[in-house]
Image (cartoon, coloured by chain):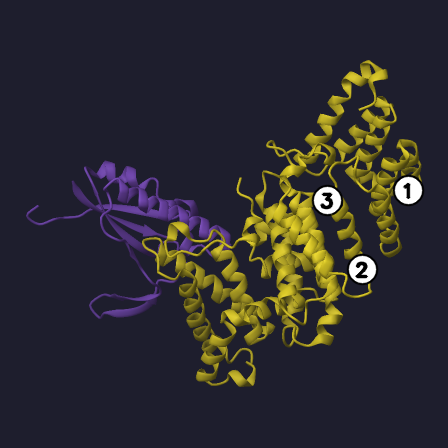
Chain colours: A purple, B yellow
Amino acid sequence: MSKFMFIFRGGGIATPGVSPTDLQAHLKKWRDWIDALTQSGHSREPGNPLQNPGKTLRGRAGTMTDGPFAESKDMITGSLLIEAKSLDEAAELARQCPVFEYDGSVEVRPLLVYGG
Amino acid sequence: MANPLNDSLDPPEESARPAALAEDLFRRESAHLVAALTRLLGPAHLSLAEDVVQDALVSALQAWRFGAPDDPRGWILKAAKNRAIDAIRRSRRLAPLPSELESNEALSTSMDRVLSDAEDGANQLAMMFSCCHEDLSDDTRVTLILRFLCGLGPREIARAYLVETDTVDRRIHRGRKQLQSLGRLHDVRAPEEVRARLPSVLQALYLLFNEGYHGSDADNPLRTAMCSEALRLTDLLLASEVTASPEVHALAALFCFDAARLETRTDSDGVFVPLSDQDRSAWNRGLLERGIVHLSASTSEAELTRWHLEAGIACEHALAPSVAATNWPRIVALYDALWGLVPSSVVALNRALAIAEIHGPGAGRDAIDALEGDRRLASYPFYWAALADIARRAGDPSEAARSYERAIAVSRSRAERTAYERRLSSLVGALVHPCNGNR
């Protein structure tokens, strides 16, 4: 098994004006998805929800800016480490992610493990 | 399908496990928190309260995706409080706060107090009374209640109310402006203020319940939720000494008797079942008993309101062993008294049907014919269904068929339409053999 990181962007969290009922229904889908990944042995550690806004430092001068803000569709909202046999399998697991319900995205990246 | 009314009977235990989160936690908490913050900060800050609460819920979604807190409700409360304090500090320049909230410490203390469980009922009542302002239309009042007391979004209100989302948006916009122009929310601890506004509050709750009851639709659980919310809000009125009164008990009794029959009003296909075919043993005993308790509590003062009369009629139906063994003379007498208070065609139509039960279809037909001047009845499916029913019982299946067709043409939901189509097709045999026309 290899390790992969799911990086979540946008989705319900970055969508303004979703009703309380819809937010909760969406939360349930996330819980069900994570539970399924845990039960099938693909997910062993808790994910990392990210707060916002934070700060971004850039360039030699370390120019600092606030953000990203919740309105940004490209804002990274969290990550999750999973185990899968291949990049294809990992991508297949990501396909069921509820983030797509609100037009978000999942980036699937293999973890580079030294000496692995 | 789970019965949403169970919510109001036995509130589900809140558990720390996210899988067992009360299904409507977000919806409920958003309504509670918006009411609490608006009461504290004043309605001028309504939008701030809504934004803060929305933000707190979004952050709960964000954080809880990967794991849940031990106390979800407390988590949301704390998130809302912190965000509210931040937002208020930022917006102090924009709109002045009540002077007693000027210092940060006072703000935090007042915030804790208004967010406490002890204040929850008063917060919601203050919001409920403010939503029923005299200058607003009935539809706008009910829409505001669905928005600010039930925590529904515009799209959900549109679904529940069977109107376009744009219409709901307009009503909310109008209502929000009205609310924001109030210096403070209604004082529900002042008996005079309560007395003056209570009738329009009860009227709005009645409309809320009826919207859900008469349009109930198996495809649309929001409709039943409107009934349980109306019952919950009536209970809230009864839980506070200043707002509890005999007429509120009467309205609660009416809701209980009607709600007890809710499950049997539609069959497994979601089609309306006529009263005569409903399984009376399946009526909800708990709700019937609650109705009787409320009805006896409603008679402590001399004044007889329309809610008393309607509850009395619903009680007669609810307690009768069958259609035939129903006390129709008493129902006619109650409709006569109701007509004295609310002379509407719908009351007269129901009275006519009760008369048909006592004196036969001919007398019922005469009573309905007396209504023909009211043109609005033509778009009321129940009017045509009543005519059809009387014609069928009078042994005139072709007249009955014509009226069922009119009822189908103006029916408002699939449940209604299918019910009338079934009755129409049950006439087919009678149309071929006219002598079989009777039942």
Instruction: Tell us which disc is closer to us: 2 or 3.
Output: 3
Q: Which numbered circle lies on residue B249?
A: none
For mark 1, what is the residue?
A: B371
Q: Are marks 2 and 1 on the same chain?
A: yes
CA gap, disc 1 and disc 3: 30 Å
In the displayed structure, B234 sits above or below B120; it is: above
Residue corresponding to mark 3? B319
State the residue at coordinates (65%, 67%).
Answer: B177
Camera-side residue of B304 and B112: B304
Which chain does the residue under circle 3 lie in? B
Output the chain of dot 1.
Answer: B
CA gap, disc 2 to disc 3? 21 Å
**Residues beneath discs 1 and 3 located on the same chain:** yes
Q: On what subunit does the disc labeled 2 rest?
A: B
**Above-or-below relation of B79 to A81:** below
Residues at marks 1 and 3 touching, judged by CB atoms closer than 8 Å: no
Residue B80 lies left or right of residue B223; in this view the side is left
Identify the mark nearer the N-term, 2 or 3: 2
For mark 1, give the secondary structure: loop
| Secondary structure beneath label 2 | loop
Q: Quadrant of the C terminus of chain B?
A: top right
| Residue B357 coordinates in the image, percent (x, y) | 85, 36
> Is tag 1's residue or tag 3's residue first in the polypeptide sequence?
3
Q: In this rendering, does residue B172 appear at all?
A: no
Residue at (61%, 49%) from the top-left corner? B286
Q: How many marks?
A: 3
